[in-house]
Amino acid sequence: MTEGLTPGRDPGEALRLDAVYKAFVPRGRKAEPLLALEDVTFAARPGEFISLVGPSGCGKSTVLNLLAGLMRPSAGHVIHAGREVHGVNTEIGYITQDDNLLPWRSMLRNVEYGLELRGVPRAQRRDRAREFIELVGLAGFEDHYPHELSGGMRKRAGIVRTLAYESGVVLMDEPFGPLDAQTRVILQDELLKLWDRRRPTVLFVTHDLVEAIALSDHILTFSGRPGRIKRAYQVNLPRPRDVFHIHEQAGFKELYDALWDDIRAEITGAGHAA
Amino acid sequence: MTMSRLGRPRPGGVLSRTAAHARAAAVADRIRVYGGIALLGAALLLFWEFGAGLIVDRKYVSRPTEVGAELYELAISGDLWRHTSITMYEAGLGYLIGVAVGLAAAIVLVAVPLLDEIAGPFIQAFYSIPKIALAPMFIMWFGLGTLPKVMLAALMVFLIVLVNTVAGVRGISPGLIEVSRVMGARGPSLLRTVVLPGAAPAVVASIRLTFSRAMVGAVLGEFIAATGGLGFLIVRSSRQFETATMFAGIVVVAALVMLVNAVIRAAEARLLPWSSTEVHG
Ligand SMILES: Nc1ncnc2c1ncn2[C@@H]1O[C@H](COP(=O)(O)OP(=O)(O)O)[C@@H](O)[C@H]1O
Ligand SMILES: [Mg+2]
């Protein structure tokens, strides 16, 4: 990851935010415009796994929405694969906090959805979907509708649905937020194994510092209101990672403590009203 | 604390016994519900047959056996079929027109949100007119034939389908639409894979429930001025104190609405296995 250095379009970068500002005008008569992001600059090289952590409301989801092309920056540049993002960006994968599976499609047909929209022939996309379903242990549930699956199963389905069409960049917004602690760790492990197959660039938003350390190559901490990048941390733990015992790794504790000091200052409002 | 056990049942035995209990409980439940329905129905019919005459003059309430005999007579003479086919034609055609126009108008309003906001107050004003109040005007405009009844039935259906379809589309989660767009859905593919199925439960529920409204429209129109139809049959027989015939007409109307609702509901369960929705109207 390179941070705040060369403005411009390095073709070796998977994505870049360059001096990005984002303001919102909330609905309502007396509402003041609100600066959600201020001068955010960072870039990711292909294959990097980057986590964004910071107090809630600091603009992490906004960063992902900008890259997905669902919003436009108020100032600055949002660049993906060397080109400025204009309109909805269908070249990336976006896994939101809500699983957003289509309730009227069976699990299998949900996993096929991205491939279907890309015009992959039926037999081929079915094979691909089944392969991914198998990888996350969902075989046997192909014909279930989302409301018939557990929270963990829906998450798995949502993740493989996006990974199945193998975009170079994958955005994940607190994907494991609502899950119980055990399921979370298991899914982190599965995610790393899936990621390792093709190593897409991942931007991963999380509240969980252990999760950020276990998964990432780099961690960006954000400060809140307006959201700015506070610091960038490199995670020098070897891969493949053992997420179940990550806290026993040399170097884990130092990194965790540094992140926690950083974040705690934001949450307890040192200088900022939360 | 201790974890030593005194005896140990076989796990297979536990499962099959639990399943058997659950099945037996479900059967018992069914029997109670259907038995209750049969009992209440029988009690009502018996009261009507033997008890109602003690409270009001038998002339005004007839008896189930007389109503049954009258239905049989009407069926034999061909009158039943004639009146039923007239009413079904009016209600059915009006229903189809109302659904089609309601859906088309909803698509326009969804596609052009500004139009939706402009049309909003007018739709609400129209919504608040009891459609019955328009029946005499429709007869005046369209005469004594089937046309005013068809129009009245269509009008009863149109607004409800319109309002519920718009609400159905608006009710689709924005997140679902955004994620689908990022995955590559747009234009027709977004419509086909997200918007239509997302709005479908509300639309289908409104389509199912409005058939009874179409019946109301047709029968009301017949009450006011007609030469045939179940509404005409009911009004004419009530004026002549042919109470059994009047009840026969009412029974047929109720049976038709229930029959059509059951057919639509069965189709709905097949088309939309994932959901069921409340309808507003
Ligand atoms: N579409 C929007 N309209 C208005 N304000 C928004 C919108 N999206 C986000 N915001 C505001 O921007 C700030 C950052 O939001 P968000 O990116 O969701 O934060 P995070 O994901 O870090 O919790 C919040 O104050 C939020 O209320
Ligand atoms: Mg967020």
Image (cartoon, rainbow, N blue to C red):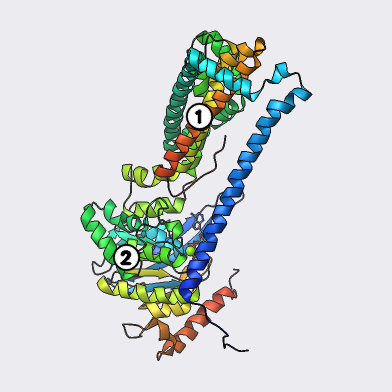
Q: Nearer the viewer, mark 2 or mark 1?
A: 1
Find residue A133 and name its label. 2
Q: Quadrant of the N terminus of chain A?
A: bottom left
A65 and B155: which is toward the camera: B155
Give the residue number, with chain letter if any, for mark 1.
B211
Q: CA distance from mark 2 to mark 1?
A: 43 Å
Q: Position of residue B3 (x, y in %)?
A: 57, 87
A186 and A255: which is toward the camera: A186
Q: Is mark 1 within 8 Å of ligand 1?
A: no
- Is residue B13 visible in the rendered image? The answer is yes
Q: Position of residue A177 (x, y in %)?
A: 48, 68
Q: Chain of mark 1?
A: B
Q: Chain of mark 2?
A: A
Q: Measuring 52% from the left and 25% from the top, which residue is drawn there?
A: B214
Find residue B80 and name its label. none
Q: Position of residue B222 (x, y in %)?
A: 56, 14
B17 and B184: which is toward the camera: B17
A230 and B204: which is toward the camera: B204
Verify CB contact (< 8 Å) between mark 2 and mark 1: no
Looking at numbered disc 1 in the image, what kind of residue is underneath it? Phe
Query: Mark 1: which secondary structure?
Result: helix
Query: Mark 2: which secondary structure?
Result: helix
